[in-house]
Amino acid sequence: MSSVQRQSSSGSDGSATVDEKKRKRMLSNRESARRSRMKKQKQIDDLTTEITRLEMSNNQVRQTVDARERSYNEIESANNVLRAQAMELTDRLQSLNSVLHIFEEVSGFSVDIPEMHDPLLKPWQRPYPSQSIPASSSMFFI
C-alpha cells in the first residue's frame, strides 16, 4: 500500500525524496570510499615503517655476524700459529729427550725423562704435570 500512496502523491514530492535519498547514498558512498582509502594508506604507511625497522634490524644482524666472523678468523689464525709453535716445541723437546737418552747411555747416570704426549690429540689435557723438574748443575758434570 505504501508504494501506491507514494505514486499517488505529487510528482515533485516523490522525485525530491528519491533525489534526496540518492544524494545521501552518494555522499555516504564517497565517505565510505574516503575512509577505505585512508585505511589503505595507513596500512601502507605501517608496512613501510615495518620494512624500515626490519631493514635496520637486518643491518645490525649483518654487522654483528661480520664482526663475529672477523673475530673468528683472527682467533683461528692465532690458533694456527699456536699449533705450529706447539708442534715446533714438541719437536724440540723430542730432540732434547734424544740428547738426554744419549747422555744417559754415555754417562751411565739415570735421568728422569717424562713421557711425551701429543698435545694436538688431547688439547684440553696438560701434557705434563705442573710440577717443576728438579735439575742441578752437578748432575751434568762428572
Image (cartoon, helix red, strand yellow):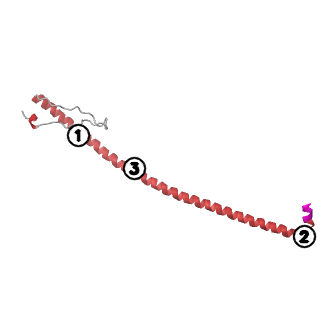
* Span shown in magenta: 1-6
Queried whether the magenta region covers residue 14, the answer comes back as no
Q: In the orientation shown, which residue stands out farthest toward the left?
A: 142
**Three-letter residue code for mark 2:** Gly
Q: Nearer the viewer, residue 28 or 55?
A: 28
Q: In the rendered view, would you say 109 is above or below 34?
A: above
**Label 1 vs label 3: CA separation?**
30 Å
Q: How many marks?
A: 3
SS at badge 3: helix
Whole-percent x, y for residue 65 in the image: 42, 51
Q: Earlier in the sequence, mark 1 or mark 3?
A: 3
**For discs 2 and 3, the disc positioned in front in the rendered view:** 2
Horizontally, residue 28 falls left or right of residue 113, namely right
Question: How many C-alpha atoms fall within 10 Å of the one at disc 3: few (<14), some, or many (≥20)?
Answer: few
Horizontally, residue 141 falls left or right of residue 1, namely left
Whole-percent x, y for residue 130 in the image: 23, 37
Rendering quarter of residue 127:
top left
Instruction: Identify the residue position indicated by label 1 in the image.
Output: 89
**Three-letter residue code for mark 1:** Leu
**Three-letter residue code for mark 3:** Glu
Give the residue drawn at x 54%, y 57%: 51
Instruction: Identify the residue position indicated by label 3 in the image.
Output: 69
Give the residue drawn at x 75%, y 67%: 27
Quadrant for the C terminus in the image: top left
Rendering quarter of residue 97:
top left
Q: Which mark is residue 11?
A: 2
Specify the principal SS of the magenta part: helix
